[in-house]
Amino acid sequence: MPAILIHGVPDTHRLWAGVRRHLARTDVEAWDLPGFGAPRPDGFGSTKEEYADWLIGRLEEVGEPVDLVGHDWGCILTARVASLRPDLVRTWAGGNGPISARYVWHPLAKIWQDPVEGDRFMAELTPDGFAADLIDGFEVPADVAEDMVRYVDTPMKDSILKLYRSAVRMGGEWEPGLARMTAPGLVFWGARDPACQVEFADELARAIRAEHVVKLDCNHWPVLQRPAEVAAALEAHWRHHPPPRNLKPDWDQMR
């Protein structure tokens, strides 16, 4: 029963490197979403529904329920998957990804959702400028921010725009489905996140009946800023829900 880690925007699987260094288990995989360091399938339109369907397809290939974890859009998409296909998810954990009709998209998301302003933003985007925004606005360490923006290529820019434009009313559309989630849940959140306010951690936890909410003293990226604490919370969550033992019959005693 592997653990599958899903990144958000504007990230790739590299987001999870720090957390993975602090995990004891070795059956951990971090996947790239299409357009985010991985090719997009032919005809893939990068909408929120297509990303959820893509994740479902990949999880079906695993062949057994997984420990599913997501951050930012990874949180939103994995929660959607867990609500649509609870049979694919053994446990769920996610953070800094609001799924609420009350949530108001942050200013940058609104720019991306605008066909004119969003296209202009991406056309004028420079690595140095984007890195500065991540450092100043979200307290991402400078070396990490500089590495992150290296992977913001043309496919990722296009994927971001299409994803956000499909998600103007995501909260109202997907919030009701959270009640169908059956996997034991953990919510972790950077408590000083200006884009995804910490009140939505509690709201998400109530919606999915999460067992624990872990609020960390950091900004939007606890996975980068508090990797040891995130790893500890995940491992405690998984220990509390050990996988079922594959018991084999003791033939000697049965003779």
Image (cartoon, rainbow, N blue to C red):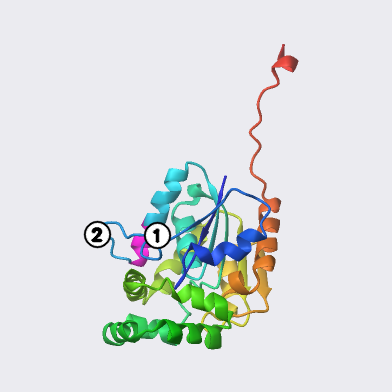
What residue would you read off at disc 1?
Answer: 52
Residue mark closest to the camera, 2 vs 1: 2
Q: Position of residue 25 (x, y in %)?
A: 65, 50
What residue would you read off at disc 2?
Answer: 43
The magenta-colored residue range is 47-53
Q: Is residue 100 left or right of residue 48?
A: right
Q: Position of residue 250 (x, y in %)?
A: 71, 21
> Disc 1 marks which amino acid?
Ala
> Disc 2 marks which amino acid?
Gly
Residue 220 appears in the rendering = no
Residue at the image position 40 percent from the left and 72 percent from the top:
170
* Distance (Cα) linking label 2 and label 1: 15 Å
Residue at the image position 40 percent from the left and 59 percent from the top:
52
Query: 173 or 57: nearer the eye?
Result: 57
Residue at the far top in the pictured view = 255
Question: Callout 2: helix, strand or loop?
Answer: loop
Question: Callout 1: helix, strand or loop?
Answer: helix
Residue 174, quarter of picture: bottom left
